[in-house]
Amino acid sequence: MFSAKKRDTKKGSSIDRCARCGACLAFCPVYQVSLMERFSPRGKNYLLRSGKIKRRQKLIKETVTACLQCGACTSLCSSGSDVSALIRRTRQDESYFQSLPPSLFGAWERLGQERSLKAVSFLERLSPVLKDFTGRINLSERPFLEHLGFYAERHAGQRVLSSYQKGVDRPRILFFTGCVQNYVYPEIASKIASLFAWDITIPKDQTCCGLAAYSQGAMKQARRFAEKNLAIFSKADFDIIITGCASCAHMIRKWPVLFDEGSGIQETARQASERVLELSQFVLKYDFSEIDGQAFDKISVQIPCHQRFGLGAPESPILALKKILGKGCQISDKGLGCCGFGGTFSIFNPEISKKIFKSNIARHFSSFTFNKTSKVVTTCSGCLLRLRQGLKREEGAPEACHLVDIMVSDQESKES
């Protein structure tokens, strides 16, 4: 299979291009709140590539763990250095640097999402860290993919985006929900489906996109997630993959790098990666009429890191909101930055995560007064988890919601 090690460690590769210029210090969320050189991308690069430093020590492990895998340093490095890949490779090669064992992701893939969640519920009794994390997440009693009929009925009669791309045949859509929208926020997935009157393909057996495994260097497990989804997708006829999560869209874009170059499955993965659109990108690509009847005073937009750096579409959520709401709403032109979630990052680096949230999100609302029609909008399921948890603790801060919550109000949901 494809060897990331051969690609990333050969002479002249992207990993050893670091010029130690320090430009990354201005973009790394972890360095910005810690101001510690070893937590900067160039600091991590030096520590991991230096032959003079004993690698297997607590300090180095702490440094490697403290990486959001947000992609900021990689995307903005003028030398083309890829420190994110170096950290993934280090985690892949040496179990000492793994925050979570790859076998955990393998179990998720083998058991399936439902049984894996039951296993997590058991393990959280043994792990204070895991218990603290899962204690902040309320799983829905009705996962979206297992209760499609319930949610279709609940949003029956919802307004439909029938006006997009007038005069052009409607594309066939496959909906990828992602884990969080399936198990934690099924209402969001339901609202997205309702935009198209449920006239879309929703594979019930779809599974995790593999981002958590990929970020932890568990490439074998990430590859299995991709393979399973691609096999399921191959049974459907579709032109576009839509997802309501920028992080899932980013990972689907990454699927081709998990396979051997020139292989048939890499070509299949490439085709899928070229068809995926995060919801705000879809709104901008097709011609929509403004949405009537929504009353909002102020909207701040949090731009997820994977939206900004992974998809390269930082303006997409703001432009999409302006397009669907028109001029009747005050929308901030400056998007909020990293929320500090980073999946497993927030589990093992809770204090740094809180500092990032305080610096990039909370402090922006400390001197403003908001009313009930004010919202903080995001396009990532993980960011939404972090925003809803964090903003509850900030007095007077607006509520966080997903882009589709602006497009489809709760009042229009039909209770069954």
Image (cartoon, rainbow, N blue to C red):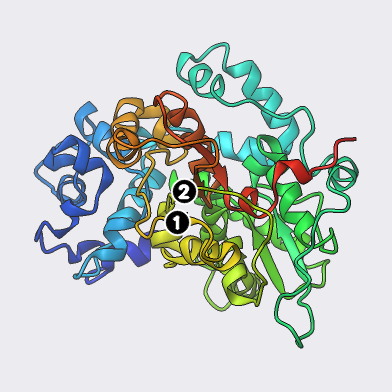
Residue drawn at x 60%, y 49% as measured from the top left: 295
- Give SS at disc 1: strand
* Residue 298: assigned label: 2
Which part of the image, by quadrant, shows the N terminus? bottom right
Residue 272 in percent (x, y) is at: 64, 70
Residue 389 in percent (x, y) is at: 49, 28
| Residue identified by numbered label 1 | 331
Q: Is residue 293 above or below residue 160?
A: above
Residue 21 in percent (x, y) is at: 9, 61
Which tag, 2 or 1, sits closer to the chain's start?
2
- Give SS at disc 2: strand
Amino acid carrying label 1: it is Ile
Label 1 Cα crowd, 10 Å radius (few <14 / some 14-19 / many 20+): many
Residue situated in front as seen by the camera: 197 or 345 = 197
Q: Could one spot residue 1 in this view of the protein?
A: no
Which part of the image, by quadrant, shows the C terminus? top right
3D distance between C-alphas at marks 2 and 1: 6 Å
Amino acid carrying label 2: it is Lys
